[in-house]
């Protein structure tokens, strides 16, 4: 983050940290399997990330760095909780963690591919996707909004999902 003022560097870091919260929680939860414990570990991870913000290199990918720190926090949590009944031992957490870290990059690629594919959809098809998956409307509600039969909406959404899956597959092969 060279060439930026301290305030700009802090703002960029806070934005990256905020954007990573869902993925960090998913990662930690996949290791611990307990919501409350995962929340505690994510908070500890956030504190460590904040303390180490000066170590973050400009232009580097934030998520792999954050996940690596989260991994150590999960391992520390498992070690510290060894007195209590724990779901996983340290060796299993380490093995699962390595596999999950590999998946983080894949999920980011999938997210980018999906965004590109959605951007290329005609307006009416994008609206149908948004009604179903962003607003969680039922098939019947969508049919009413778009002025169509429920069966036609169901078939259209099935075709759209297949089309998006193919588009994502091709985009990911290209990258």
Image: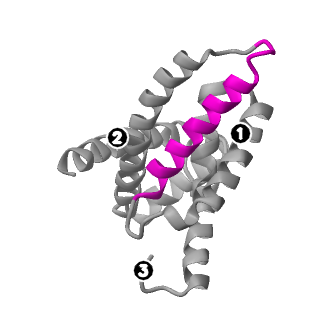
Q: Mark 1: which secondary structure? A: helix
Along the line of sight, the residue nearer the viewer: 106 or 54: 54
Image point (22%, 52%), residue name? 175
Image point (39%, 44%), residue name? 105
Q: Which residues are magenta?
A: 61-85
Left or right: 144, with 110 as reference point: right
**Residue 165 got which mark?**
2
From the viewer's perspective, is the residue at label 1 or at label 3 nearer? Answer: 3
- How far across and down, in percent of the image, does residue 120 sit? 33, 62
Mark 1 vs mark 2, CA separation in Å = 34 Å
Image point (41%, 70%), residue name? 58
From the viewer's perspective, is the residue at label 1 or at label 2 nearer? Answer: 1
Q: Which residue is mark 3?
A: 2
Q: Which residue is mark 1?
A: 41
Tell me which label, 2 or 3, sits earlier in the chain: 3
- How far across and down, in percent of the image, does residue 73 sit? 63, 38
Whether residue 114 is situated above or below residue 166 in the rendered picture = below
Tell me which label, 1 or 2, sits earlier in the chain: 1
Image point (52%, 44%), residue name? 67
Left or right: 153, with 7 as reference point: left
Q: Mark 2: which secondary structure? A: helix
Q: State which quadrant residue 74 falls in.
A: top right
Mark 1 vs mark 3, CA separation in Å = 30 Å
């Amino acid at each position: 983050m060279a060439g930026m003022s301290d305030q700009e560097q802090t703002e960029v870091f806070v934005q990256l940290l905020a954007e990573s919260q869902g993925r960090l929680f998913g990662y930690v939860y996949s290791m611990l399997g307990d919501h409350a414990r995962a929340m505690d570990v994510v908070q500890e991870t956030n504190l460590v990330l904040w303390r180490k913000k000066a170590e973050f290199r400009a232009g580097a990918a934030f998520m792999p760095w954050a996940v690596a720190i989260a991994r150590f926090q999960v391992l520390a949590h498992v070690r510290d909780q060894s007195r209590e009944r724990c779901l996983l031992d340290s060796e299993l957490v380490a093995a699962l963690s390595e596999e999950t870290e590999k998946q983080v990059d894949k999920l980011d690629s999938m997210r980018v591919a999906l965004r590109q594919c959605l951007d290329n959809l005609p307006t009416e098809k994008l609206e149908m996707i948004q009604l179903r998956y962003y607003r969680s409307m039922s098939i019947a509600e969508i049919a009413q909004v778009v002025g169509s039969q429920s069966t036609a909406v169901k078939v259209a959404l099935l075709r759209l999902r297949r089309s998006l899956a193919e588009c994502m597959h091709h985009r990911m092969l290209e990258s």
